[in-house]
Image (cartoon, rainbow, N blue to C red):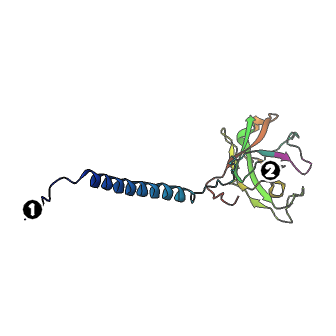
């Protein structure tokens, strides 16, 4: 009886057949991988959103003499207790809402004795003492004397555009306690308004 050696090497022909089958299988797998990669790649698409610009705001303010009463008009012969008006329109010429602060300053011997109070009116002031539709107007800031540092006036927030212009009346009063030593003396007044842009708002929809 003949015994077959299971561990004997296969014949060359058999080994060649096994190599061909293995190579065929590897090629098939490799081909499938390549085909699969190409098919998945065709599903990848991309699209860019249109460019969107980002622009910073601008700040601008215009202080305009109003009611035919120029700021440069001189006042003479003041007596303690006398008062006079200056009318000013504050316009936001910037591109967004801004907070406005005024500063009334004065130089000269009369400066410590000049008091100021400011009021706003939704329409143009008339030149009478009750010149805002028969009322005194809405106070802007607290009245008081013009100190060496000037008198600050909080105008609040003003939207841009001519339709949101703030119409103001400055009332200057020569303090009744002014001493006789300031007779014939003079002072110069100035009104300056500064704008500060108001941020912290959602601009997603403009």
Specify whether 2 is left or right of 26: left
- Does residue 66 belong to the magenta stretch? yes
Pointers 2 and 1 in contact (CB under 8 A)?
Answer: no
Specify whether 105 is left or right of 3: right
Q: Secondary structure at mark 1?
A: loop
Identify the disc placed on residue 129: none
Which residue shows up at 54% across the image and 59% down it?
A: 39
Which residue shows up at 73% across the image and 47% down it?
A: 115
> Where does label 1 land, which residue?
3
Considering the image in quadrants, where does the C terminus appear?
Answer: bottom right
Considering the image in quadrants, where does the N terminus appear?
Answer: bottom left
> Where does label 2 land, which residue?
91
Residue 63 in the image, given as x and y percentages of width and height: 81, 45
Mark 2 is surrounded, within 10 Å at the Cα level, by few (under 14), some (14 to 19) or many (20 or more) other residues, namely many
The number of callouts visible is: 2
2 or 1: tag closer to the N-terminus:
1
Front position in the image: 173 or 24 = 24
Front position in the image: 167 or 129 = 167
Classify 73 as above or below 92: above
Most distant residue in the front direction? 1
Range drawn in magenta:
63-69
């Amino acid at each position: 009886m003949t015994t077959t050696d299971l561990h004997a090497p296969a014949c060359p022909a058999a080994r060649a057949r096994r190599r061909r089958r293995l190579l065929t299988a590897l090629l098939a797998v490799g081909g499938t991988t390549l085909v699969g990669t190409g098919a998945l790649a065709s599903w990848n698409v991309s699209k860019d959103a249109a460019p969107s610009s980002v622009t910073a705001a601008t700040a601008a303010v215009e202080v305009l003499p109003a009611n035919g009463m120029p700021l440069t008009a001189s006042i003479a012969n003041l007596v303690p207790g006398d008062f006079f008006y200056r009318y000013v329109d504050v316009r936001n010429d910037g591109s967004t809402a801004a907070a406005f602060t005024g500063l009334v300053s004065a130089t000269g011997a009369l400066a410590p004795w000049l008091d100021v109070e400011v009021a706003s009116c939704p329409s143009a002031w008339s030149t009478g003492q009750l010149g805002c539709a028969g009322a005194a107007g809405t106070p802007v800031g607290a009245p008081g004397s013009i100190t060496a540092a000037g008198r600050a006036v909080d105008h609040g927030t003003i939207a841009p555009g001519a339709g949101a212009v703030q119409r103001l009346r400055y009332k200057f009063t020569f303090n009744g306690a002014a001493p006789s030593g300031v007779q014939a003396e003079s002072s110069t007044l100035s009104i300056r308004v500064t704008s500060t842009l108001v941020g912290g708002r959602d601009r997603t929809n403009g």
